[in-house]
Image (tube, rainbow, N blue to C red):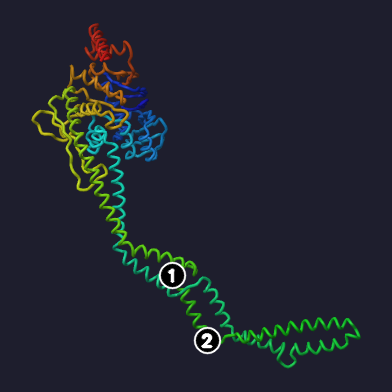
Amino acid sequence: MLLNLIITNFAIIDRLEVQFDAGFNVLTGETGAGKSIILDAFGLLLGDRARPDLVRAGSEEATVEALFDLAGRDELRQTFAESGFPFDDELVLRRVVQSGGRSRAYINGRLATLAQLQPLSEQLVAVCGQHEHQVLLQRNVHLDILDRFGDLDEQLRAYRDLYQKRQDVVRQLERLEAAERDRQQRLDFLRHQFDEIGTAQLSPGEEESLAAERLLLQNAERLAAITRGGYEALYEGDGAVCENLGRLTADLQSVATVDPELGSLAETVQRCLYELEDASTQLRSYIGRINFEPERLEVIAERLSILTRLKRKYAPSESEILALQDAMGREIAELESSGETRYKLADELADLTARTLRLGGELSAARRKAARPLAKMLVDELNDLAMSGASFEVAFDPLNQPGHDGLEKAEFMISLNPGEPLMPLARVASGGELSRLMLALKRIAPDADKVPTVIFDEVDAGVGGAAATAVGSKLRSVSRMSQILCVTHLPQVAAFADHHHRVMKREAGGRTLATMACLTGEERVREMARMLGGAQVTEQSLLHAKELIANSTAV
C-alpha cells in the first residue's frame, strides 16, 4: 500500500508531504483547491508525459516521490526483480521533471525508462476515473478479472503449462523446417569433408615421421659417403686404424713381461680396438640401410603436401583434424536422422495440441459459466450505484489457434440504458461510470486486478442521496481488501472514510500554495459541514455532519 507521498515544486505546490494509511482515505476540498494537481502527480508516477508547466514558477525542477509498503507481495517482488528493480518490503517511485520539460524516473533509486515505469507502477496504483489509466479499458485484463472471479487460476495454470510445452515443440519444429532448406546442402558439404579426411587415412605424428624420413633421403649420398669413408678408415682400407691398433696391441703384449706397465697399456689399446671394430660394424650396417630410391622421396613429398593442405583447411595437427572428423560424423548422423526426429516431433505436437484443446475447452466452458453470475452480480451492484437499467455481458472471441491465455479473448460489454445495444466499455462509459463499474467489480471480485492501492476519481459524479451513501459504503467495504484513495465532493461518501484529508489553497508571500492536512475530530466535522452547507458552516450543518459520520460508522 501507499505509505507516503512527497510533492515538491509541482504546479502550485511548494512542498507537500502526506502519510496515508490502510483502509479508506478520502481527499476533499473546495473546487480549485488542488485535488486535481495531486492526481496529476500520481499520473506522473504512472508514466504520464512530463510537461514544463508542471514545474512551479521560479523552480528548476519538480519532484514527485511515493513510498510503498509491499510486504507479503511476492508476485510483485518477483515482477520487479525480473525487470531489474529488486526490493525487500518497501519500494520508492520517484519522478523528476525539469523546467525545460525533460524528466527522469527512478525505481528504488535506480534510473528507469518510462517504458519500464509504466507497466510496473500500474501494478502498484490503479487510478479509476482518468481514461488513460483505467484498467477496465485494457481488454487484455478482462479475462484476468473473469478468471479470478470464477476462481479459475489453477485451471488456467494447468492450461498454460501444457500450452508452453506445445509451444516448445512448435519452436523445435520451426527450427527443423527452417534448417531443412539447408540440410541437404550441409549434409553434402559435410560428407565431402568427412570423405576427404577419411581418404587421407591420417595417423597422429605421421607428419613428423615423414619429415624426418625426407631429411634422410635428401641427404642420402652425403650420409653414404661419410659412413663408407669412415668404415674404410677404421677397418677396410689400407692402413686402417683397426689393423694398426691390432699390431700395436700385439707388440705391447710381447714386452709386457719386460715391463708390466706396458701390459696395462696393451689392455687399454685392445679395448679401444674392440670399440672401433664395433663402430665399423655399425657403419657397415648403416651403409646397407641407406635408401637411394628417388621414388620414395616423391611419395613422401606428395604425402606431406596432402597433410599441409588438410592442416590449412581444417586444423593445425593430425589429431585435431581427426577430432573434427569425428564431430562431422556425429553431425552427419544427426542430419540423416532429422527426418525421423521431425516425424516424432509432429506426433508429439499433435498429441499436445489435442490435450491443449481439451484443457482449453474445459477452461472456456468454465469461463462462460462464471460470466453469468459475474454479469448478474455486477448489474445488482450497479443498481445501487445510480446505474440502474444497465446491462452487462462478457463477449468471447474464439482464437484460430490456442493462445497463452486460452482459446479465446474476452471483452466486457455494457449498455447503460434499457433498450440500447451492448457495446465495449470505452465507447459508452464516462470516467465516473467507469469508476463505479470498477468499484462494483472490486466489490464482487476483490482480487480482480491485485493492485494494492486504488485511487477513485469521479466515482461520485452525477450521484447523490441514497446512491452516494451506497458509493461510500461500498468503497469502505472494498478498502478492507485494498487501500482506497478517493477524491470526492460528497459528504455522504466522505463520511465512510477511515482517514480524511483536506486539500486547501492559501496565499503566502504573494504566491498561491496548495496544502493538505489529515483531519480528525472537530476539524473533520467542520469539513463535512462545509461540504453539506457550502462556505457558511452553521450549527445545523455541524449536527448533520456528526450524524452522517455516526450513521456511517454504524453501517
Q: On the picture, is 344 further left or further right than 306?
A: left
Q: Secondary structure at mark 1?
A: helix
Residue 535 position in % (x across, y down): 24, 12
Q: Is residue 67 visible?
A: no
Q: Residue at x 70, y 91 (%)?
A: 236
User: Relative to the observer, which residue lies in front, 337 or 278?
Assistant: 337
Residue type at numbered disc 1:
Lys
Q: On the picture, is 459 further left or further right than 266?
A: left
User: Relative to the observer, which residue lies in front, 48 or 238?
Assistant: 238
Q: On the picture, is 481 further left or further right than 108?
A: left
Counting the numbered discs, the total is 2
Q: Residues within 10 Å of mark 1 (few under 14, many from 20)?
A: few
The N terminus, quarter of image:
top left
Residue 202 position in % (x across, y down): 48, 73
Q: Residue at x 27, y 11 (%)?
A: 550
Q: Which residue is mark 2?
A: 294
Vertical comparison of 224 with 461: above or below: below
The C terminus, quarter of image:
top left
Q: Residue furthest top?
A: 539
Q: Quadrant of residue 506?
A: top left
User: Relative to the observer, which residue lies in front, 429 or 350?
Assistant: 350
Q: On the picture, is 277 further left or further right than 263?
A: left
Which label's residue is closer to the chain start, 1 or 2?
2
CA gap, disc 1 and disc 2: 29 Å
Vertical comparison of 401 with 316: above or below: above
Q: Quadrant of residue 281?
A: bottom right
Q: Which residue is mark 1?
A: 313
User: Relative to the observer, which residue lies in front, 277 or 529?
Assistant: 277
